[in-house]
Image: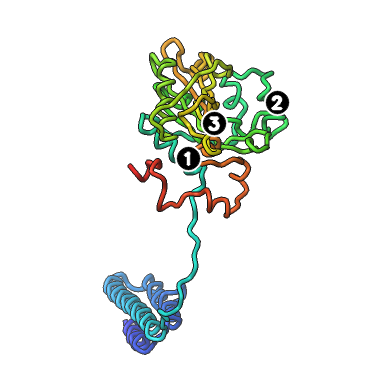
Amino acid sequence: MSDIIKIKEEYLNKLQEISELKDINQIKSELFGKNGKISNEFKKMGSLPSEDRKKVSLDLNATKNELQNLIEKKIKDIEINEINLKLKNEKVDVTLPERTFSRGKIHPVSQVIDEISSIFSEIGFNVEEGPDVENEYNNFTALNTPENHPARDMHDTFYLDKNKKFLLRTHTSPVQVRTMLQGKPPFKIIAPGRTYRSDSDQTHAPMFHQVEGLHIDKNINMGHLKGCLNYFIKEFFEVEKIKMRFRPSHFPFTEPSAEVDIGYELKNGKIIIGEGDKWLEILGCGMVHPNVLKNVKVDPTKYQGYAFGIGIDRLAMLKYGINDLRAFFETDYRWLSHFGFDPLDVPSSYRGLSR
């Protein structure tokens, strides 16, 4: 017992005198380390008579707690003193000029993805995502694309293995496959994201952005598709009226299929959407092929629906007057400063902030 009292008195005096954290750490090690004095006292308890252990244990724990509390208080006092000393000695020259800084801009593609997502969310579409690296089944086979289809050719598709089982997705349509395989109808989704094809010129890039739309339910028809696209185009281009026509086309995953054109005219070198007698193709669409529904375990006798695919980069070019797709990916800050959007002053069409 005298050893415990002696340790307590010794270290109470030491703690009163020290004023640096390194000395505190030294004391903690001396007391509570593996071979510390308090630790050794606990080890000795096993050799004490059973009738003495309870009292010794109480006294030893009380001493341990008292020393630990004093150490914690001492640490706080030292830290506060150090802060006060710094505040006293350090001075800030408020006459110095402020540091220069550059405010970032929102990329036009990011801006347009936000606009598209906001518009479609207003009419009940959910946003879904999928991986950029896809398997051949989701990208082609499940979407009713035959083995000999040109889209499967190496000249168009970036394959990642010799067996052509894995690839960089050529469209965002695999997201609709994944969504339908994981759930049950009805489905009403859009899937914006990056896509990849072996192509590069003023209006094409090896990587570009696309948004896929899908609506599957009972009694869905082409009229619903036309109404959906009419609403989207008017909202996106912020026009009261829109001229829109459907031209027959062919896609393996839709039947019937169509290309959608919108009316426009040129004024002072600018494209004006919604006016004039010229036509501009902006997207492809159609009714989901029954084979696609069968491949994702949806009964085509009960459910049907439409799908559409829109090039996000092309929409950005049309709406914001950008004439070269390659500039989107050149990471030129001067270009971004001109065409980018201030995050604190976005256009009114960016519903994420304005509504």
Relative placement, left or right, of 55 versus 279 is left
Viewer-side label of 3, 1:
1
* Dot 2 crowding, Cα within 10 Å, few <14, some 14–19, many 20+: few
Q: Which numbered disc, 3 or 1, marks the residue that appears first in the sequence?
A: 1
Residue drawn at the location 42% of the way across and 25% of the way down:
230
Q: Is residue 153 above or below residue 13?
A: above
Give the residue number, with chain letter if any, for mark 2.
Answer: 153
Q: Is residue 178 above or below residue 12?
A: above
Q: Residue furthest front?
A: 268
In this orientation, which residue lies closer to the viewer: 128 or 262? 262
Q: Quadrant of residue 172?
A: top right
Q: Is residue 69 visible?
A: yes
Q: Is residue 193 visible?
A: no
Give the residue number, with chain letter if any, for mark 1.
Answer: 112
- Circle 1 SS class: helix
Q: Residue furthest top?
A: 301
Could you say where residue 316 lies in the image, as x and y percent from the top left?
52, 39
In this orientation, which residue lies closer to the viewer: 246 or 182? 246
Relative placement, left or right, of 331 versus 23 is right
Give me the C-alpha separation between circle 1 and circle 2.
Answer: 31 Å
Give the residue number, with chain letter if any, for mark 3.
Answer: 172
Amino acid type of disc 2? Asp
Give me the C-alpha separation between circle 3 and circle 1.
Answer: 16 Å
